[in-house]
Every structure is written in C-alpha cells, then in structure tokens.
Amino acid sequence: MLTKATALACAVGTAQAFLAPMAPAALRTSTFAPTNVAVSTSSKAAARWQALQMKLGDADEPIVVIGVAADSGCGKSTFMRRLTNIFGGSTVGPLGGGFGAPGGWETNTLVSDLTTVICLDDYHLNDRGGRKVSGRTALHTAEQRFDLMAEQLAALKRGDSVKKPIYNHVNGTLDEPEEIKPTPIIIIEGLHPFVDQRVRDLLDFTIYLDISDEIKFAWKIQRDMLERGHSLESIQASIEARKPDFDAYIAPQRAQADVVLQVLPTQLVPDDTEGKILRTRLIQKEGVANFDPAYLFDEGSSITWVPCGRKLTCSFPGIKFAYGPDVFFDNEVSVLEMDGQFDNLQELIYVESHLSNIGTKFYGELTQNILKLSDSPGSNNGTGFFQSVIALKLREVYERITSSKGAAVAK
Amino acid sequence: MLTKATALACAVGTAQAFLAPMAPAALRTSTFAPTNVAVSTSSKAAARWQALQMKLGDADEPIVVIGVAADSGCGKSTFMRRLTNIFGGSTVGPLGGGFGAPGGWETNTLVSDLTTVICLDDYHLNDRGGRKVSGRTALHTAEQRFDLMAEQLAALKRGDSVKKPIYNHVNGTLDEPEEIKPTPIIIIEGLHPFVDQRVRDLLDFTIYLDISDEIKFAWKIQRDMLERGHSLESIQASIEARKPDFDAYIAPQRAQADVVLQVLPTQLVPDDTEGKILRTRLIQKEGVANFDPAYLFDEGSSITWVPCGRKLTCSFPGIKFAYGPDVFFDNEVSVLEMDGQFDNLQELIYVESHLSNIGTKFYGELTQNILKLSDSPGSNNGTGFFQSVIALKLREVYERITSSKGAAVAK
C-alpha cells in the first residue's frame, strides 16, 4: 500500500491544469502521464476497494455523482487533489494498470480511492476528422453523445461497470473504450455536464467554473504570446472564433449550477490587465438539497471586509472579501467573494475563522487543506481558496446523502 | 422621593435640544422650564446625596469629569437623559429649588442623582452688550473666562463646591452666580471645553459633537425657512457670518476629542439635501485610558455591512454600517459608521448583537436604552444610537476610573 507521503509526491506530478483552462490537448494529456506515478496492482486495488466498502459501511451506499462544467474540458487535477485531501483517499492518478484500461496512459479518467473523474470529452460524437466533415466545433451540443452519457452515468450510479469510450486529445481520435467501475463518488467534468436533462437528473451536486473573458485572454497572452511567441492578433482571433459556440452551448449551463466559481480581474488595481491578481466569486444557489451556502460574519446580510487592518499586514494591493444575497439567472443566490491574494498562513486562518458553513470538521481544516497543496496553482488566491471550500462542501453533501438515503432520493 | 415614572415624565419635558444645535437662546432656555418638573426639597436632596455616597462607596471616590464640545452650546438634555438612564439616576432637571440657585429657572445647569452638566456659556467674559463693545462673537476664545473655568473645575474635581456665574441666554446678561456642588460625574459642555490646557487636563473623557455644514444648513432651512418664513438668503448669510469664528475657535477642538460624533448627509440617497436621513460616524481615538473602541464584527479590519438581507427587511433607503481604522487629525482612530435609520426593534437588537466593546452589561442593554427614550430626537438613527453607545462607554470609563484610582491618576 502506498504511504501518504508517496501519494502526495505522485499527486504533485499530476496537478497543473485546473488554472490553465486554455491548455491545448497535448499539454493537458501530458499531465496524465507523470513518470513517477506508482501504479497499484490489481490485487492491491481490489483490497483497497474492499477496505473502502467496509469503511463506508453498507455496500448499498448511494453513489454520489457530481457534475463540474468548465471550459478547460478536462484535467482539473488540482481540484481532484483538493477533493482527495479532504475525502481522505490516498492516491490520485490516471485510470490504468490494474484497473484494466487498455491504453493505460491514454485515458482521460482520474481515479482515487473514493472518486472517479470522468472527462466528458470521451462522449464526443466524432473524432477530429469527423468534425471537419460535420463542420461543427467540439463545443457544439450536436457533437456529444448524450444518450450514451446518460445511460452510462445511470449504470454507474446503480453500481454497474460501464465500457466508456476514450477521446484521444493528442490524436483527436476515438480510442477503444475502457472499463469504469463505480466508486462512492463519481465526478463528471467537461463542457456539457448540465445540457442533457437525463444527465442533470443524475447529478447530486453541480459546479460551474466560470473564467471571465478578460482572464482567459490575459492567461492566453501570458502563455501563447510571452512564452510561445504567438501574435496578439492570432490569440485574439482564436478566442473570437471560439466565443459564439461557447456562448451558445456552454455558458448557459451556469443557470443550472448549484455553485458557480467565477474568476474575474481584480478590482483592487485599477485597469489591471495582467490577470495575476484575481477576483473570485463563489455563487451559491439557495434552496439546494444537502447544501447550506457558506457565509461571512452574518448570514443574509451584505458585507465587505478588508482584513488588512491592525491585525494583519497585507502587501499591496491587499485582500478584500465580500458577501451578500443576489440574484443569478433568476435564482436566489448567496455570493462569497475574494479579491487579492494571501501572503501568509496567518491570513488564511484568520479569514477561515470568520467564515461559517464551510463544511469543516475542526477549526483550521480549510487552512490546513490549502497549505497541504500550497505549491498547487491558485493556492494563494480565491481559486484555491474557494476550490477548497467547494471540496469541503462536497464532503458535506456526500455525507448528508450517504447518511440519509431518503434525502438523496428526494433530490 | 420621585418615582421612576414621574421622573421620566419630567424628563420628557426637558429633552428636545440635542438635535437642534441651532436653536436660539430663547428656545433653548424654555426647555429648562418645564411646567411639570418636580423640585426636590433641600432635605430630600441631602438624603439622596447621602444615599448616593453610600451606594458609590468611599467618599474619596474620584469625581469623573467629562467634556462635551458642540456648536449647540447647551441643552443636550436628550444626551443627559440617555446618560441618566444608563447610570441609574432617577431624576433629571435644571439645578434649582433646594440646590440654591438664585433664579431657579434661569440656570443653565442640569442635574441628576449622579451627574451635573455645566454649560460653559456661563464662563462668557462679557454679556451681549459687552460683546458689542469688544466686537467679538461668543465663539471667540478671548470671550471666555478660562482662568475661572479651570479653577472652578479643579475645585469641583477636588470635591469642593463653587459659585459659578450664570449667562442668561434670554437677556444675554450675566446673572448672579449659583452654587454648584460636586457630583460623582461632572459634565462640562459648550463651545470651548478643550481649548484651555488646564481645563483639558482635568477631563477624564472628551466628546465632540460634529454636525456637518450640510446638515446644519438643512436643519436651519427646515426650521427658519419652512417653519418661520425666513428667506434662504438670510439663512445662508447667518451661517456664513458665523463660520469663520467657528472654524477658527471651535472646530480645531476635534483633534482633542477622545470621541467625535459626526453627523453628515446620507450617502444612501443620491444628492440628498433634506437632512432627514443621516450618516453618523463615531470616531474613536485609539490608546485612550479606560476606553476600548467599539467595533463591528472584527476589530481592526475595514468592514461595510448592510443588515437588510434575508434576515431583516428595511424600507428604503435601508441601513448601512461601516467600521474600520483611520487617521483623524494625525491620530489613529477606529470609526464606526451608520447611514440610514431603524424601522423597528428587531433591527436594533440585531445590530447590537454584532457590535462588540459597546460597554453593555447584558445582551440587549443598548437596545433597551434606546427604546426607553424612543420618543426622543434621533432615537431611530445614528445620533441616538451612538449617543447611547457613548453613554454606555462613559459608564465603563467611570467604573474603570472609580474601581482603580491608580488608573485615574495615571491619566
């Protein structure tokens, strides 16, 4: 069995892409092929699964399915690691080896002890060549196999294994299917998790990662222009080309999400275009089963908070939090917002101490989880902070569902 | 002995002027002559004083002296009543009857069981006629008898009685002096409490009531133009005429105050000129002996708070609080701010529950005190709210000083 230290060392190798939503397929796929991943053998995996079943109690335990929508497609391994940290699983890696995927390293599926993350790109209708014929982008809903997606997710939720197709991001081809076995938590992530009503009805909790156009652009400039020498015009053109389909087929799913994590330019620095300091907003829908929105100081009030007074000294441009009720796509929501970044641990724990309903089991658990992954992208800003909050809230949702099947069925 | 109900009924008759700082002398003086004031006899007063001495313990108990600076001159009977409510005294009224003032009703001095409020206008150098000769306004520091003020305040603080002059606001004359006996708390209020260093050194706590020019103007318009038919030009002229001396001799004292209560136009209604909805700021100096600034949610941070979310429904334009560190006349301060007004009790107690260091002895005491005087001016806005906070803090200052003479001496 892997020690925790080894597992974390492995995990570091797989975690880069959550904050690089525009990473091309080749780059993203490479994150699934770290050289130092320790592959479990079949028997180890079986033993682990058995132990988990015992740990989780009843084998009829409901399987909790979570949907994550994001432009990045796949590769949210940082988020996956934050989840694994909190759920207590000890390994994170690509499906393969003992789990019976044919190609092994070409899978898009990530697994840990408790969770399976399925990339919805695997349900593309056509390969890259096919899309040249159809004339549609991969963003188009007509390019997804929703029937199969719904059927296989339903099977997994029932506890059955499925043979899921694989979309090869390097070649743009559809490879031979791999076997997916159900785990207590199944996460589907990709471009269209909330488009099909049947798929949506299978989801116990839904998250949309919403990177604003300004931040997408700033990040793309940083990588494609400054690091790879592309022209500003070509970057602008590639974004503009993608935008109509994105707005038509992806963005409307924001209305369906229980939680939207928005990433926006900072408002602390006037006219900031660098996209290095981020304003992040956790938009939490009211009235969602098994979910009570996190809040700052006083539930239901509107609050701004700059915790850089006499208690903390923050370097320019500081940190600003906000919280309050709002309406988002006609839904009542509570919004928790963070602008700026953390300079040190002291600030993290101080902020945690003033938040409520964050799903922690002990004081400091949020801070501890962020620190464990302090090298991961976004750990010093709201993306990491709110990812960790979401991970804690997902654990809460999971535990509420599994401790009360009635509640899960009622959803 | 007066019953509490009678005392409160009396007090209602004397309480109008705190929020009418521009009230002319005649109007102000009339508030000192309610027809239903029950006058204590000499023997009753002596018995009460004796009882108080016992209640307060050691007769060597320090006498606590508080300075209140305000443009209104005298007549802060609402504030006095808020203090009396909190300190537990049962009668408030003009000095007179058994206390030996010659004219009785012409005194400017207010007394309760525990407190004496001395109006500093009584230390005017010249009467109205004399100022016509000197060519100076009553705002001029050269028109005050600071030597006598310092000498008499020092005597009172030592526990000695004094023969204090009386300035007659009706006639503008200097009347025959009245005898002032020391009480456990002595408040001097008027135009120049912090100008003279000797007087200032005798003060245990200092408060400045700072009505902004806009609000002064709005209130004067309301009263002098709409109610009395004066012209806008004459009102403007009278304000302009007074402003140079005010700015030269009164306003600079703000730098000396431990607490400044600012009254400003609301920011909730764009371009409001009515002055009916107020923004009030409690500017609290840091590092003052026996005084810890009140704060909202998180000491030392910068916070805004609109408590009209899902928990409270506020009518337009709502209520907004703010809190944070600032610098005021080169001093470190903590500012607590309230914009808007309360619609009901629920809001008051809710706000109280989120404030800290407000000097209450039990949860709800602040709300209770405001409600007791709910008919008084400002009870539904920040003037009444912060006056009550100041009253609670003064009790705290008083109790800290009297429970530790060392601390008082160190001041």
Image: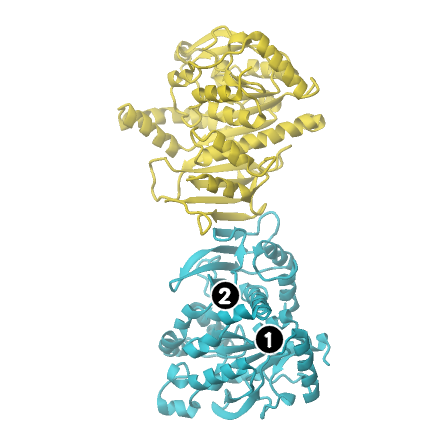
Chain colours: A cyan, B yellow
Q: Are marks 2 and 1 in contact (CB under 8 Å)?
A: no
Q: Of the residues under marks 2 and 1, which one precedes in the sequence?
A: 1
- Residue at the spot x=56%, y=89% of the render? A179
Q: Secondary structure at mark 2?
A: loop
Tag 2: Cα neighbours inside 10 Å, few (<14), some, or many (≥20)? some
Amino acid type indicated by mark 2: Ala
- Of B170 and A193, nearer the camera is A193
The disc placed on residue B170 is: none
Q: Secondary structure at mark 1?
A: loop
- Residue at the spot x=53%, y=29% of the render? B207
Marks 2 and 1 sit apart, C-alpha to C-alpha, by 18 Å
Instruction: Quadrant for the N terminus of chain A, please.
Output: bottom right
Q: What residue does disc 2 label?
A: A289
Residue A126 in sight in this render: yes
A299 to the left or right of B173: right
Q: What residue does disc 1 label?
A: A61
Q: Are marks 2 and 1 on the same chain?
A: yes
What is the chain letter for disc 2? Answer: A
Give x and y (percent) for residue B295: 56, 42
Above or below, comparing residue B395 to residue A154 in the picture: above
